[in-house]
Amino acid sequence: MPDPTQPSATPDFLQHDRPPVPDIVVPRGLLPFHLHQKPVRGRLIRLGPLADALLGRHDNHPAVTRLTGQALALTAGLAGALKYRGSFSLQAKGDGPVPMLLADCTDAGALRGYARAEPEALRAALVEAEAPEAGALLGKGYLAFTCDQGPEMERYQGIVSIEGASLAEMTDHYFRTSEQLRTHVRLACDLTPNGWRASAFIMERVAGEGGIDPDLDQEAQEEAWRTALALAGTLTDAELLDDALASPQLLHRLFHAEGLALDRPRALSYGCRCSRARLAGVLQGFPPDDLDHMAEDDGVITMTCEFCNLGFRFDRGEIRGQIPG
């Protein structure tokens, strides 16, 4: 099969082949759970080697890589609570050293993401702190969660200002202010002896009576939630990122005395959806003068996918561009 990043005799708009990127699937990447007849449900996300495959595509500073890994695990976890066809995305835009952070997950569990950093601003932030958290990296701006099910379905989007030092605190702020949902979120990402690993633990206080013991009054339900919070608070990053500690075993450690019930796990995979056809369509939207400016000395335009960091080469003579009307 020819390399789809390179020009060929086949018209660009017909080239939908997946570029040469890792083909990785983590079969039990997301494990939902609930506590029997108690107002607690949640999801444990362990990206395993998928984290290294996604994060290793970019030569970012470790602080930026950690933030991206946390965003990927968080996005997979939030998407796992929804019934949708399409993609669910997290996007953060701010005025800090990392002005753009984006991660998305399809209904099939295909993940992708990237962060764009400003080198000079990042160097200044690293002088202030060796490992700056999300708040220092993103600065002031907004956090958006979007569920896009295609042009024929209404797109849902929730937007909130960036509030909190960590991405977990920002997410909790979103749920408290926009969804009136009580949550507990813990995110972890770090470079381990096995490569980059990323994980998320998300727990929610269930509203209503469905699936809850009818003998539990409001105070008893609150006590069950407080107990679950206390147990979840014992989680460590080391446990979340340990490949040798299976997700069912980790949840059993936390909630074995609280009626733990595991639901059907969900697979997660490498999910960049770029193709030569997609990028060719983007180029066709530029006016000819801009295309001429983009062309290198050899008459080739190179477009790099921000997610997988692959460069696609296009012959300038094959792209007509959009003539201004």
Image (cartoon, rainbow, N blue to C red):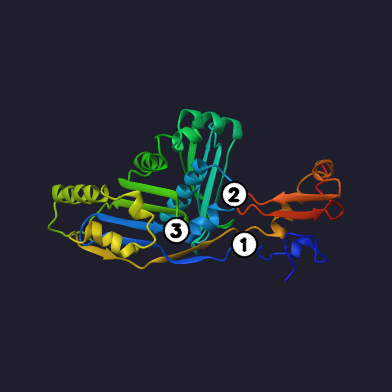
Q: CA distance from mark 3 to mark 2?
A: 17 Å
Number of marks present in the image shown: 3
Front in this rendered view, residue 63 or 256: 63
Q: Earlier in the sequence, mark 1 or mark 2?
A: 1
Q: Position of residue 297 (x, y in %)?
A: 86, 45
Give the residue at mark 2.
58
Q: Position of residue 116 (x, y in %)?
A: 58, 41
| SS for dot 3 | loop
Front in this rendered view, residue 7 or 206: 7
Give the residue at mark 3.
47
Q: Earlier in the sequence, mark 3 or mark 1?
A: 1
Mark linked to residue 260: none
Q: Position of residue 218 (x, y in %)?
A: 16, 48
Left or right of 124, for residue 8: right
Q: CA distance from mark 3 to mark 1?
A: 17 Å
Mark 2: which amino acid? His
* Crowding at mark 3 (Cα within 10 Å: few <14, some 14-19, many 20+): many
Q: Which residue is most to the front?
A: 193
Instruction: Choose top left, top right, bottom left or bottom right for residue 60.
Output: top right
Give the residue at mark 1.
21
Q: CA distance from mark 1 to mark 2?
A: 13 Å
For image coordinates 14% across by 47% down, the residue present is 219
Q: Are marks 3 and 2 in contact (CB under 8 Å)?
A: no
Classify 171 as above or below 276.
above
Front in this rendered view, residue 164 or 85: 164
Can you say which quadrant of the picture contains the C terminus? top right
Mark 3: which amino acid? Leu
For the question of whether residue 126 can be seen, the reply is yes
Q: Earlier in the sequence, mark 3 or mark 2?
A: 3
| SS for dot 2 | loop
Mark 1: which amino acid? Val
Left or right of 25, for residue 289: right
